[in-house]
Image (spheres, rainbow, N blue to C red):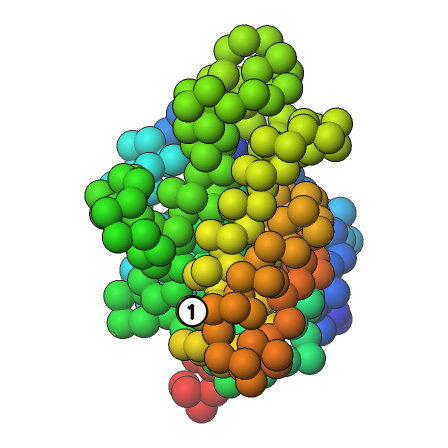
Amino acid sequence: MNLVVAGIDLGGTNVKTAIVARNGEMLAKDSRPTDADEGLEKVLDNMSASLDAAMEQANADPSDLVAVGIGAPGPMNWRTGVVFSPPNLPGWDNVPLADLMAERHNVPTYVDNDANVACWGEFWSGAGREVDSMVCLTLGTGVGGGVVVHGRLLRGPDGTAAEIGHMCVARGGRVCNCGARGCLETYASVTGMVRTALEGIESGKRTILTDLCGGDVERIDGKMISNAIARGDEFAAWVMNETGIWLGTAIGSLINLINPEMVVLCGGMIAAGEALFAPIRATAKEQAFEVPANRAVIVPAGLGADSGVIGAAGCALQRYEEETKTRG
Ligand SMILES: [Zn+2]
């Protein structure tokens, strides 16, 4: 019998599931639309169908499944597995997600914050396999964060630890969705980067982005900015560089705070490569103390887009094993 664990990444657009061996190796994966607009039951049905399909693909028997882990958007209570009311899952209000999925599949189920599980995935099986302490940033519509210190994922009593996207990097800065001002994600998420581009265009900067978007600046996105850079557009390169400087500023502080061996960046934006990583590394080095700055390597995710699903499985496995140990 080959015991396996399942990880489910519950996003507002897609549900992804991975079946993972106990050593962290991914055996099968499934992805399908979340259909978030169709309400809770439909989302649960899609999660169940995704789990069943991935199990079948892995050729695993239900009795081989040790635990299921779900990476969900916050806020939530990770201990009870109750998800409060995520903005991208309309109609969700205090949903006992862990219990509902445990009943459906008759298997211990655990819920954790989606950025935290991505961090754990990179620590368990990705870029951070060999390290003891690391910081992870997920760059998407927002900026998610995770911190592992001495092999432990930092969750905090309220589950809000490592909300790196809401570190203040600019006093009185841009207004954030969380209500505060100057949060990192208002500058360094894909949305924040686009905002930097739009501000520049409004102030009269010349750029081929205005042609690429066909005159409709609302259409500008991260890919369009990368395209413009590839075509030699100086303004687009400046926008990417600014984004890297904002990230480097925060990462420099994180290096002083945590003294990590590694900082891992996840998300589609890391495809920008050196255009993004060079200003991040230079700024972090300027900002942080010399010794920890020299120690902390800043690298792209080792698991690509799978950090979240693999990490959700890893978190569940770890929590299951700890619970079993405690019970004796
Ligand atoms: Zn914020």
Residue 187, image quadrant: top left
Q: Residue at x 26, y 52 (%)?
A: 171
Front-most of residues 63 and 324: 324
Name above or below for residue 142 compared with residue 297.
above
Query: In this orientation, does residue 246 appear?
Result: yes
Q: Residue at x 46, y 28 (%)?
A: 200
Task: Name the residue at the top extreme.
Answer: 215
Q: Quadrant of the N terminus?
A: bottom right
Task: Name the residue at the bottom extreme.
Answer: 328
What is the x, y in percent for residue 24?
69, 68
What is the x, y in percent for residue 267?
59, 47
Disc 1 beta carbon < 8 A from ligand 1? no
Name above or below for residue 156 compared with residue 241.
below
Residue position marked by numbered label 1 in the rendering: 253
Left or right placement of residue 140 versus residue 176 in this view: right
What is the x, y in percent for residue 274?
70, 51
Q: Quadrant of the C terminus?
A: bottom left
Asked which secondary structure carries label 1, the reply is helix
Left or right placement of residue 3 versus residue 45 in this view: right
Query: In this orientation, does residue 9 appear?
Result: no
Residue type pointed to by label 1: Ser
